[in-house]
Image: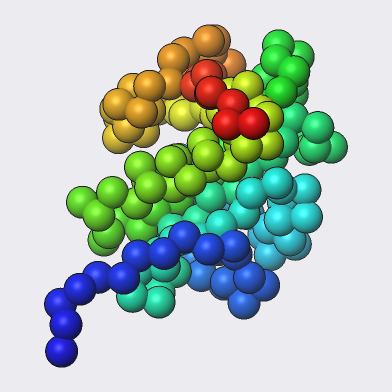
Amino acid sequence: MSNMTSIIIRDAKPEDADTVLKLNAAEVQWTSPISPQRLEELAGLSCYYKVVCVNDEVVAFLIAMHSTSQYENANFEWFKARYDQFVYIDRIVVAGNTAGLGLGSRFYGDIAKFASESNAERLVCEYNIEPMNEASRAFHLKIGFTEVGKQAVSEQGKIVSMQTLELENNN
């Protein structure tokens, strides 16, 4: 018997929805609530919707939109008003019990490659600064994101840091 850990990133499947919803609910203070119907809508609008499996168990997901998406979201629209070609990371959730496996870094490496190959100029996202999501702040700083603005998310009483990471196109 092997002690090896199998980690794969793959496209999300409809049967992953229940697990994705549970992962999101566990971190809802940092993301936002999502219903099964809204998840289906986001999946349909997304250019990138993948999961990370550790030993065949879904433990993380990432949903992103291309700048050409018809996504109605205040943070997405903030970026759209300022940049032409980007991939917007709408939400990423990694199960807390997988800390230390580098899943967030693997995900960001995969989406950066995807975005670059899609001729996007940058990855964009936001994270909470009020209340402060220190883990997300430190992670995005380590990856090389820079703050380009701040925005109040009034319906949730949050303030977010608007972040961008310039990409090198592979095409």
Judged from this view, the residue extending furthest toward the right is 70
Q: Is residue 118 above or below residue 50?
A: above
In this view, 152 is above or below 5: above
Q: Quadrant of residue 104?
A: top left
Residue at the image position 36 percent from the left and 28 percent from the top? 143
52 displayed left or right of 114: left
How many labels sit on residues? 0
Colour convention? rainbow
Residue 121 visible in the displayed image: yes
Position in image of residue 86 (x %, y %): 66, 26
x%, y% of residue 46? 71, 48
| Front-lying residue, 155 or 16 | 16
- Nearest the viewer among 40 and 133 is 40
Report the residue that reaches farthest toward the front. 171
Which quarter of the rendered picture does the C terminus lie within?
top right
Quarter in which the N terminus is drawn: bottom left
- Judge left or right: residue 133 versus residue 90: left
Task: Mark yes or no: residue 41 visible.
Answer: no
- Residue 103 x/y as whole percent: 34, 51
Left or right, 5 with respect to 131, comes to: left
Residue at 80% across, 37% down: 69
Q: Position of residue 37 (x, y in %)?
A: 75, 62
In this picture, is 48 found above or below 169?
below
In this view, the residue in front, 76 or 11, is 11
Q: Quadrant of residue 17?
A: bottom right
Tell me the residue at 21%/51% (across/down).
Answer: 100
Q: Residue at x 74, y 61 (%)?
A: 40
